[in-house]
Amino acid sequence: MVKRLCLAIGAGLSLSAAYEPLALAWLLPPAVACYALALRGLTVRRAGLVGLAFGVAFYFTHIAWMRTSIGPDAWAALSSVEAAFYGLLGLTVPLLRRLPAWPVWLAAAWTTMETIRSGWPFSGMPWGRLSFAAIDTPAAPAVAYLSMTGLSFVLALAGFALAHLIEGVLEHRARGQLVRRGAGLVAVAALLLAPALFPYQVSTSGTTTVAVVQGDVPGPGNNILYDSLGVTENHVDATVALAADVAAGRAPRPDFVLWPENSTATDPFRPGPVRQGILEAASTIGVPVVVGALVDDGPDHILNQGVVWDPATGPGERYTKRHPVPYGEYIPFRRYWDPKFGQLALISRDMKSGTRTEPLRVAGVSLADAICFDVVYDDVMPPQVRDGAELLAVQTSNASFIFTHQVEQQFAITRLRAIEAGRWLTVASTNGRSGVIDPDGEVVATAEPRTTAVLVNEVGLSSDLTPAMRMGPWPSRLLAVVALLALVWGGVAYRRGRGTPHRRGAGTEEDAVRNSSTPSPDESTRVG
C-alpha cells in the first residue's frame, strides 16, 4: 500500500508540473496513467484513499499561488475540497475497471468529475482541468473541435490507454493483445494530434481596432485598494496620452478602448473624481471605453461590471461578472455565519452574480466579455459566441496574484479560449498580463507586468462557429450519462465479483503485484 501511495503522490506532482510555471505538458498522459496504475487491483475504500493522495499532491501544488496571495487558510481549505474529488473518483475505479474497454469509461468519469467540481460547491473551481495544460502543444488545436470538456476527455483517455498498455506488458500478455492495446493508444493520439495538421479555420467578416490599456497599480502592486483612485488615474492618464498620440499621428485611432477589471474600485455612477476621470478619458479619445467597475447595489451588495461608456451618451450596456469568488468576493450563507477575522473581515458586502449571456455591443462590434475567473467557466464566453459575439475580451485584475504563477496559468487558459471559439481575444489587466491573442492562440502583443502600457491592434471579427461552439454543453451532458451508466454496469460486475472469490485471479492487491502473471483487475475478480 505504501508503494501505491508513493506512486499516486508522484503522479499528482507530475500532473501539477504539466501546468505553468513549468508547463511540462508531456507529463500529463504519464501522470494520468500512473493514477490508474496506482489504483490497480485495489478495493473501493483503498482506491479512494490512494486517489485522495493523488489529489492532495496535485491540487495543493497546482494552486500554491493562493497560499501567498490570499492566505494559507483559504489555500488549504480550497485545496482540500478539490483534492477530495480525486478521492471520490478513486472510489469508482474498482467498479469501472471491471468493464471491457475500461479506459473509455474511466476517462468519462474523470471528465464528469472535472465538470462537477467546476460548478460545485458554490461556483466551483475549474482550475486544473486537463485541457488547461494543452496550450503550446500539438493537442491545442483540438479544442476547436472537441471543446474544453471534450479535450479533457481525450487527454484522460490517452493516459488510461497508456496505463492499459503498460499493464499488458507487466502481465506478459499475448502479443496480439498488446498490439490491440497499442493500436488503441495510437488511435487516441491520432485524434489528439490530427487537428494540428488540419486546424479549424473561421472566416473573417471584418476588422476593428482595439486599444488595451494596462494602467498599473500604485504602491506594492498587489493591492488594488492601496490607492484605488491612483489606479483609475493611471488608466485615465494612459488613455489621454493615447489620444495625444492619435492626434499627432503616432498611433492609429482605436474603435474602442478596453480597461481592466477594477480600473475603478469606486462606483462610477456616483458624482466624484472617478466619474470625472472616465468622462475625461472617453471624451478625449472620442470612442467608447469599456470600463471595469465596482458598482453599488444597495447597502449589502456590489456588482463587478464591464460598462460600455460612450463619449456622447455616457454609460450604456453592462456585463456583470457571473462567477464571483466565494470567500474572496462574497461570504456564502452570511446570514448564518459572518466572519470578522483575517482577509474575510474585508468582505463587508457580497458581490452578486450576473446572468447576462448575450454579447455587449461596442462601436458596432458584438463583444463577448468575461471578468477575471469568468474565463475558466464554460457558461460565460461560449454562450455569448453562440449568440453572435465577433470578438472576445477579458477584463481582469491579477494584482492580488501578480507575484505568483496564477497570472501565467490564467493567461494560458485565456489563449485556449481563443482557439476554442475561433476568435481574436483581447485581455486588459490592471498590471499584468495584458495582451492580444489571435484565433490560433498566438500572442500578437503583450505588456510587461507592473508597467503602464497601451496595446493598439487591428483584430479580426468573425461570426462563424467552431464545432466546439456548436456543441455547447452537450459533451459534458453526454459524458455524464456515459459515466453514470458505466458506474451502474460496473457496480453490478463488482458485486458479482465479490461473490465469487475463488475464481481465477482472485486475491489481494499485494498478490496481484507480486505475481505478474495474474490477470488484470478488469479481466478477473478478487475479494473486495
Image (tube, rainbow, N blue to C red):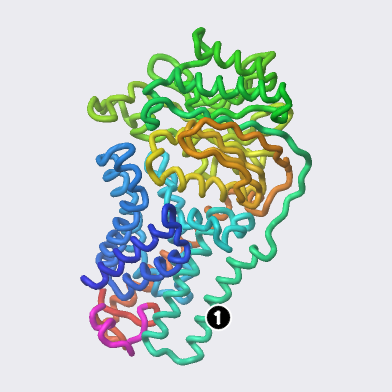
Q: Is residue 229 magenta?
A: no
Displayed quadrant of residue 299:
top left
Quadrant housing the C terminus: bottom left
Residue 124 percent location from the top left of the image: 41, 43
> Mark 1 — residue?
183
Displayed quadrant of residue 44:
bottom left
Residue 41 percent location from the top left of the image: 31, 75
Q: Is residue 513 magenta?
A: yes
Please give the name of the residue rendered at 38% of the width and 57% of the height, measured from the top-left corner.
16
Viewer-side residue, 417 vs 156: 417
Quadrant housing the N terminus: bottom left
Residue 27 percent location from the top left of the image: 43, 66
Mark 1 residue type: Ala
Viewer-side residue, 442 vs 40: 442
Q: Is residue 232 above or below residue 370?
A: above
Left or right of residue 160: residue 517: left
Q: Is residue 212 above or below residue 192?
A: above
- Badge 1 element: helix
| Segment tinted magenta in the rendering | 509-521
Left or right of residue 28: residue 146: right
Q: Is residue 328 visible?
A: yes
> Please, which residue is most extreme toward the left here?
2
Q: Is residue 486 visible?
A: no
Count residues near mark 1 (Cα–Cα under 10 Å), then give few for <14, some for 14-19, many for 20+.
Answer: some
Residue 92 percent location from the top left of the image: 36, 64
> Please, which residue is most extreme toward the top here?
271
Please give the name of the residue rendered at 51% of the width and 34% of the height, measured from the top-left corner.
429
